[in-house]
Image (spheres, rainbow, N blue to C red):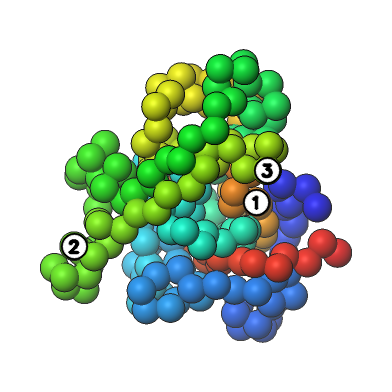
């Protein structure tokens, strides 16, 4: 299966949590066990909603957890001048890396690293206790996985060669860009790819996001 898989003009009358199981097994995405998250510039239609108006740096979804899910599914419910999502191929970046960057290291991936860089990032919490718990969340992962790809992100990772890895990995030659259109269904590898976005400020966008394991290859 490709690292990025895009179906155009995908529509299904079933509940999204029913049809997404045709593609993989949904995994919880928050402390409440939510299997589907809305990402939107508009008024929320479900409780589990994130804003789409702010920029996000290069990251793996839930990359600060020890058991991060393998794949992500994004369904574009509606898009109007919605902007793009960008992907960085960390497998290709590893293959091309100079030898001194291919030094194995146990790296810390933390939520706090993100907020140290983006202290004004909008984030709503049900209580101060949940906010404290979330911002303390972290894990340790090896920089190089199976001698195949870098597991590293600008957003969450601390390591000894951080700045050099940022400069090497996020070169244009490793990056692909997808402009959202209504009806897009995107399935992508959450470990071998990093992704980022510019916030949708003047346009409109409503996405449904799924965390997936055991993605079906057919």
Query: Depth check: 28 or 124 in front?
Result: 28
Graded by Cα atoms within 10 Å as few (under 14), some (14 to 19) or many (20 or more), the crowding at tag 3 reads: few
Rendered residue at 48%/73% (across/down) = 28
Q: Earlier in the sequence, mark 3 or mark 2?
A: 2
Q: Which label is found at residue 14? A: none
Graded by Cα atoms within 10 Å as few (under 14), some (14 to 19) or many (20 or more), the crowding at tag 1 reads: many
Kindly report the distance in space between the C-alpha atoms of the residues bearing marks 3 and 1. Answer: 15 Å
Q: Are marks 3 and 1 in contact (CB under 8 Å)?
A: no
The x, y position of residue 214, in whole percent, is 71, 68
Rendered residue at 62%/43% (across/down) = 145
Query: Depth check: 153 or 184 in front?
Result: 153
Q: Which residue is mark 2?
A: 132
Give the tally of numbered discs: 3
State which mark lies toward you, 3 or 2.
Answer: 3
State which mark lies toward you, 1 or 2.
Answer: 2
Can I make out residue 178 in this image?
A: no
Q: Secondary structure at mark 1?
A: strand
Query: Depth check: 115 or 185 in front?
Result: 115
Q: Are marks 3 and 2 in contact (CB under 8 Å)?
A: no
Q: Which residue is mark 3?
A: 146
Kindly report the distance in space between the C-alpha atoms of the residues bearing marks 1 and 2. Answer: 29 Å
Q: Secondary structure at mark 2?
A: helix
**What is the residue that sits farthest to the left in this orientation?**
128
Q: Which residue is mark 1?
A: 189
């Amino acid at each position: 299966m490709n690292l990025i898989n895009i179906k155009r003009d995908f529509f299904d009358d079933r509940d999204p949590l029913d049809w997404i199981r045709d593609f993989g097994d949904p995994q919880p995405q928050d402390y409440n066990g939510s299997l589907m998250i809305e990402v939107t510039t508009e008024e929320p239609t479900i409780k589990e909603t994130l804003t789409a108006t702010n920029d996000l740096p290069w990251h793996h979804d839930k990359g600060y957890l020890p058991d991060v899910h393998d794949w992500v599914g994004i369904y574009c419910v509606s898009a109007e001048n919605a902007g793009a999502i960008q992907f960085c191929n960390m497998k290709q970046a590893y293959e091309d890396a100079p030898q001194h960057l291919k030094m194995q290291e146990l790296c810390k991936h933390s939520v706090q690293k993100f907020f140290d860089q983006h202290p004004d990032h909008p984030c709503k919490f049900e209580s101060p206790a949940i906010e404290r718990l979330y911002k303390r969340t972290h894990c340790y992962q090896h920089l190089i996985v199976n001698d195949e790809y870098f597991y590293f992100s600008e957003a969450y990772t601390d390591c000894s060669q951080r700045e050099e890895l940022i400069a090497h990995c996020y070169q244009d030659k490793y990056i692909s860009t997808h402009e959202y259109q209504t009806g897009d269904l995107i399935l992508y590898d959450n470990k071998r790819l990093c992704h980022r976005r510019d916030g949708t400020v003047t346009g409109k966008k409503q996405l449904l996001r799924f965390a997936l394991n055991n993605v079906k290859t057919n």
